[in-house]
Amino acid sequence: MSGVFIRAARLEDARSLADLATQLSYPSTPEQIVARLDRVLGYEEHAVLVAEDDEKGVVGWAHVYVHRGIEMDGRAELAGLVVDEQHRGTGIGETLMQAVEAWALEHGCASVGLRSNVIRERAHAFYRRLGYKQVKTQHAFRKEL
């Protein structure tokens, strides 16, 4: 994995981030990504990190934020993680997760939570290998407004 480094996302990464989100079945345009980044970049309790390859450009990203509630202490929540399909299994995802965990500790969080679709068995194995434990099963509800 030489030549790959982690850095904060920038608006000019929008095309790459959109392509990667689309690979993960979240179709996005660069314009949509710019609008979304604009809402979270610069906020202390959000970070969008990218894995950049010296030769290939952005090959992965992670979005993490501090989730606060009155029922619990704040914890870091992984909102999204994707590695380019041609670079999966090369250590980029693990490096991004290490950066997420370091960010979480820097922001006073004692844990990182995440959700993963039940069909993403390879992702589940990846998270378990990194020491994450499944803590519950739940139904997700959504209402379009």
Image (cartoon, helix red, strand yellow):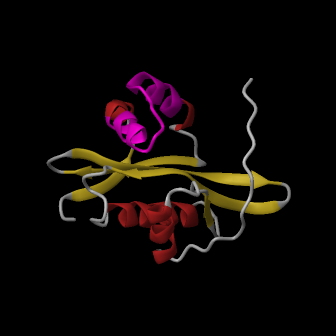
Q: Report the predominant secondary structure element of the magenta stretch.
A: helix
The relative height of residue 123 versus residue 13 in the rendered view (above or below) is below
Q: Nearer the viewer, residue 132 or 74?
A: 132
Q: Is residue 27 magenta?
A: yes
Residue furthest left as drawn: 55
Q: Quadrant of the C terminus?
A: top right
Q: Is residue 140 magenta?
A: no
Tell me which residue sits at (57%, 41%) in the image: 43
Specify start and end residues of the magenta stretch as a single range: 16-38
Residue furthest front as drawn: 119
The relative height of residue 89 versus residue 141 in the rendered view (above or below) is below
Image coords of residue 46 (percent x, y): 56, 46
Tell me which residue sits at (31%, 49%) in the image: 84
Image coords of residue 85 (percent x, y): 30, 51
**Left or right for 43, reference 12:** right
Image coords of residue 28 (percent x, y): 44, 30
Q: Nearer the viewer, residue 15 or 68?
A: 15
The relative height of residue 75 versus residue 143 in the rendered view (above or below) is below
